[in-house]
Image (spheres, helix red, strand yellow):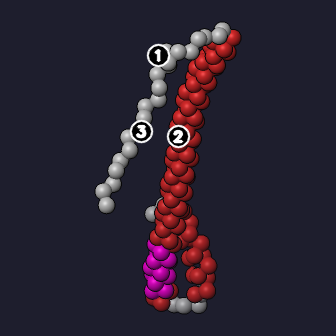
């Protein structure tokens, strides 16, 4: 037995055995043996309960750790998703800036060409493609 268990047994024995005074030697020995057995049973049950309590506490800590880990994973996924969205938005912004630059170049060249009068001829500019008509038979 551990030192703590021995001190517990001694404390229980000191509290119980003085109440048994006035017995003859034979009966006193029986009572001491019975008390020692009972105290040993009490100590075993106490130790078992103590172990269960420690185990329950460890399980509780483990559950909290799992919950915290799950929460961290959830936050990491959220951050990853936001980062992907930000990267996508950045790419879109770069692409739209590129089209704005292209449109700005077109508009600057259009203003330059507007200043110079160009003779329009029918052969110079192609005509838009005609739509084909579909005839539905009745």
Q: Quarter holding the C terminus?
A: bottom left
Q: Are marks 1 and 3 in contact (CB under 8 Å)?
A: no
What residue is disc 2 on? 80
Looking at the rendered structure, the secondary structure element under dot 2 is: helix
Query: Gap between marks 1 and 3, in whole Å?
Result: 21 Å
Q: Are marks 3 and 2 in contact (CB under 8 Å)?
A: no
Residue 45 position in % (x across, y down)? 47, 75
Q: Are marks 2 and 1 in contact (CB under 8 Å)?
A: no
Sequence order check, earlier mark of 1 and 3:
1
Would you call the spot at circle 2 few (<14 residues within 10 Å), some (14-19), or many (20 or more)?
few
Residue 28 position in % (x across, y down)? 50, 86
Q: Residue at x 51, y 52 (%)?
A: 70
Residue 5 position in % (x across, y down)? 51, 66
What residue is disc 3 on? 131
Q: Residue at x 57, y 25 (%)?
A: 99
Q: Is residue 44 in the magenta section?
A: yes
Instruction: Report the predominant secondary structure element of the magenta stretch.
Output: helix
Q: Residue at x 47, y 81 (%)?
A: 38
* 53 up-or-down from 134: above or below: below
Q: Residue at x 64, y 19 (%)?
A: 107
| Foreground tag (2 vs 1) | 1
Looking at the rendered structure, the secondary structure element under dot 1 is: loop
Sequence order check, earlier mark of 3 and 2:
2
Sequence order check, earlier mark of 2 and 1:
2
Residue 106 is labelled as none
What residue is disc 1 on? 123
Query: Gap between marks 3 and 2, in whole Å?
Result: 48 Å
| Foreground tag (1 vs 3) | 1
Task: Provide the residue span drawn in magenta.
Answer: 30-45
Residue 91 in which image quadrant: top right
């Amino acid at each position: 037995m551990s030192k703590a268990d021995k001190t517990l047994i001694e404390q229980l024995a000191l509290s119980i055995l003085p109440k048994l005074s006035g017995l003859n030697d034979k009966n006193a020995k029986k009572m001491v043996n019975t008390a020692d057995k009972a105290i040993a049973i009490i100590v075993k049950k106490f130790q078992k309960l103590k172990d269960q309590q420690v185990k329950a506490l460890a399980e509780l800590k483990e559950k909290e750790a799992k919950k915290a880990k799950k929460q961290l994973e959830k936050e990491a996924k959220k951050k990853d998703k936001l980062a992907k969205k930000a990267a996508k938005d950045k790419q879109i912004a770069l692409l739209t800036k590129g089209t704005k630059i292209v449109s700005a170049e077109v508009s600057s060249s259009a203003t330059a060409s507007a200043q110079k009068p160009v003779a329009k001829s029918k052969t110079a500019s192609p005509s838009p493609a005609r739509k084909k008509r579909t005839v539905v038979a009745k």
